[in-house]
Image: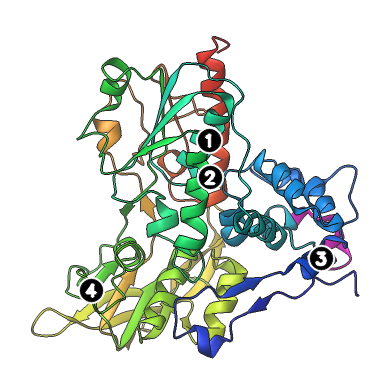
Amino acid sequence: MDVLKKVPVREQDPKVRATNFEEVCLGYNSEEAMEEASRCINCKNAQCMKGCPVAINIPGFIEQVKNGDFNKAYEIISESSALPAVCGRVCPQESQCEGKCIRGIKGEPISIGKLERFVADYASEHGVKPAGAKEKKGQKVAVIGSGPAGLTCAGDLAKMGYDVTIFEALHQAGGVLVYGIPEFRLPKEKVVAKEIENVKSLGVKIETNVVVGKSVTVDELLTDEGFDAVFIGSGAGLPKFMGIPGENANGVFSANEYLTRSNLMKAFDENSTTPIMHAKKVAVVGGGNVAMDAARTALRLGAEVHVVYRRSEEELPARVEEVHHAKEEGIIFNLLTNPVEILTDENGWVKGIKCIRMELGEPDESGRRSPVEIPGSEFEIEVDAVIMALGTSPNPLISSTTKGLEVNKRKCIVAEEEFGKTSKTGVYAGGDAVTGAATVILAMGAGKNAAKGIDEYLRGLR
């Protein structure tokens, strides 16, 4: 065994997986997990924990994996994380826990994410559940949204003994975990549904088809429904567009719509009641994880797919693993390229996308070099569908129907970073509703922090 290198993880063959929606990564078995865990040097001052937004005791659970005590490893993880099987699959470990791993200085870091996934899957297969509250506090908390922020906040509050009800706008719980991330990255029945059941096993109630702001308002939850506090974790589901000519043509989708219809409504199935267009050639505009998800979904629906991104590969915001998988599957990357017009036929359907080549200039506010157009470099890509994956912003429905709730110019709810406290007494918020579109684990961290804030508020400490 080479202690400087990770134990390889088995994956579906790229040519095979490009034709199905089954999970790409197959994960570790128990022998592989124990071998990988034995690479951990169990640092006294564990830097990996400092990179984890939910502060999992990483050396502690890895030590138990090394010893073969997978139940104990799950017990340690579930003290901090409500969704370990999810995090083990979709968290950007390379820039968080694994990015700070000491083992990675002179070799490859420990595969913390894959070990977390293994432990969570083992617990699920063997019916191991997270520990609940020993006694109830008799106070009610409403959680708006059943995505990663809401589920985490609800789970932590339930462990503290609070009576928690989640209100979900859609017909199925899970938020972005269900509608945003494809099956081949995050299986719904095997993983998401079981993680939600674990949260419910703590005593959390989930009411679906409740659109807060229409069905009931935040104010009514506090004054009429008897809730002592409210957490808003409604996410950011309002898609952004470029504002270029042709953007309203038939065959133009937001990534949000495209993925929701495919993931939540099973539109990829020809027998679906809401089938989606099976395009022959697709352009996906954007370079983040959502763009990779949309591109890889379109590929599996039979299309030749082009990712159109205005910066270079070095600036791609998507996870390295996702870009690598997309390339393996045959996605074409048109980098340093920016759309200027969507071309249509006489019936208003997409027939192509007109682009201009870019070069990188000076760094912008984020530190990334700003793309600059190269005059006279326009060219066309022939496509029959375009998916805009340019990010999302919060829907203003909740903020516009809640008295005294402050929002910023981006329509994001203003909340304290440490505990998620908003301008309205008893109301806390976190995740994409506060930050704009971000990662699952950052939303979970915000939900965890807000649970602490709500607990201190209800106990009269804040």
* Quadrant placement of the N terminus: bottom right
**Of residues 272 and 285, which is closer to you in this image?**
272
Q: Which mark is residue 198?
A: 2
**Of residues 7 and 352, which is closer to you in this image?**
7
Front position among marks 2 and 4: 2
Residue 426 visible? The answer is yes
Q: Residue furthest top?
A: 460
Cα distance in 3D space between marks 2 and 4: 32 Å
For label 4, the residue is: 275
Q: Label 4 crowding class (10 Å Cα cut-off): few <14, some 14-19, many 20+?
A: some
Image location of residue 122, percent across then percent down: 66, 58
Image location of residue 407, percent across then percent down: 36, 32
Cα distance in 3D space between marks 3 and 2: 27 Å
Q: Residue furthest front?
A: 127
Which residues fall within the magenta stretch?
99-108
Label 1 with label 4: CB-CB less than 8 Å:
no
Residue kind at label 3, given as amino acid type = Glu
In the image, what residue occupies the spot 55% across and 23% down?
161
Q: Which mark is residue 36?
A: 3
Q: Earlier in the sequence, mark 2 or mark 4?
A: 2
Residue kind at label 4, given as amino acid type = Pro
Front position among marks 3 and 2: 2
Vertical position of residue 269 compared to residue 61: above or below? below
Label 2 with label 1: CB-CB less than 8 Å:
yes
In the image, what residue occupies the spot 42% across and 38% down?
233
Q: Earlier in the sequence, mark 3 or mark 1?
A: 3
Q: Which mark is residue 202?
A: 1
